[in-house]
Image: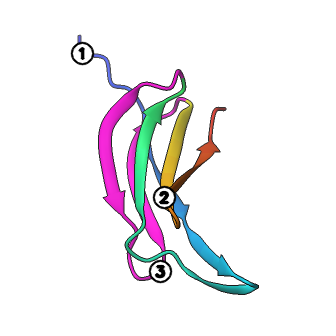
Amino acid sequence: MPHTIDHQDVTITVEKNYNGDIQPGESINVYLFTAYGSTMSQVQAADSLGQVTFNLPAQGRFFTFDTWPLKQDIIDLRQ
């Protein structure tokens, strides 16, 4: 009997903040990692609203995204 792992859509919204002027983070790459920090080889560019959506199993994940200039920020979504 096959076992199915429940998945859910997780939407990340990226915003740019330049001196209080907050704009959608369009075209910023968002990278997916496991809760242990291993890459999952998945990357998506944020859309015009600054959003990306991953369909993930109900487990913790890390997301990193490119920021300017040449810096990465990390979001910890471990549950």
Which segment did they paint magenta?
A: 36-59
Q: In which quadrant of the rendered image does the N terminus lie?
A: top left
Circles 3 and 1: CB atoms closer than 8 Å = no
Q: For this rendering, which residue is in front, 33 or 59?
A: 33
Q: Earlier in the sequence, mark 1 or mark 2?
A: 1
> Is residue 7 visible to us here?
no
Which class describes the residues within 10 Å of circle 1: few (<14), some (14-19), or many (20+)?
few
Counting every numbered tag in the picture gives 3
Circle 2: element type: loop
Q: Position of residue 57 (x, y in %)?
A: 43, 33
When asked about the image quadrant of residue 42, the answer is: top left
For label 3, the residue is 49
Q: Is residue 55 magenta?
A: yes
Q: Nearer the viewer, mark 2 or mark 3?
A: 2
Q: Earlier in the sequence, mark 3 or mark 1?
A: 1
Seen in the picture, residue 74 relative to 24 is either above or below; the reply is: above
Which class describes the residues within 10 Å of circle 2: few (<14), some (14-19), or many (20+)?
few
Indicate left or right for 79 with 71 as reference: right
For label 2, the residue is 70
Q: Position of residue 74 (x, y in %)?
A: 60, 46
What amino acid is labelled 2 in the image?
Leu
Circle 3: element type: loop
Indicate left or right for 79 with 67 as reference: right
For label 1, the residue is 2
Q: Position of residue 15 (x, y in %)?
A: 59, 73
What amino acid is labelled 3 in the image?
Leu
Q: Which residue, as the protein is rendered here, is positioned at the far bottom?
A: 21
Q: CA distance from mark 1 to mark 2?
A: 44 Å
What amino acid is labelled 1 in the image?
Pro
Q: CA distance from mark 2 to mark 3?
A: 22 Å
Q: Earlier in the sequence, mark 2 or mark 3?
A: 3
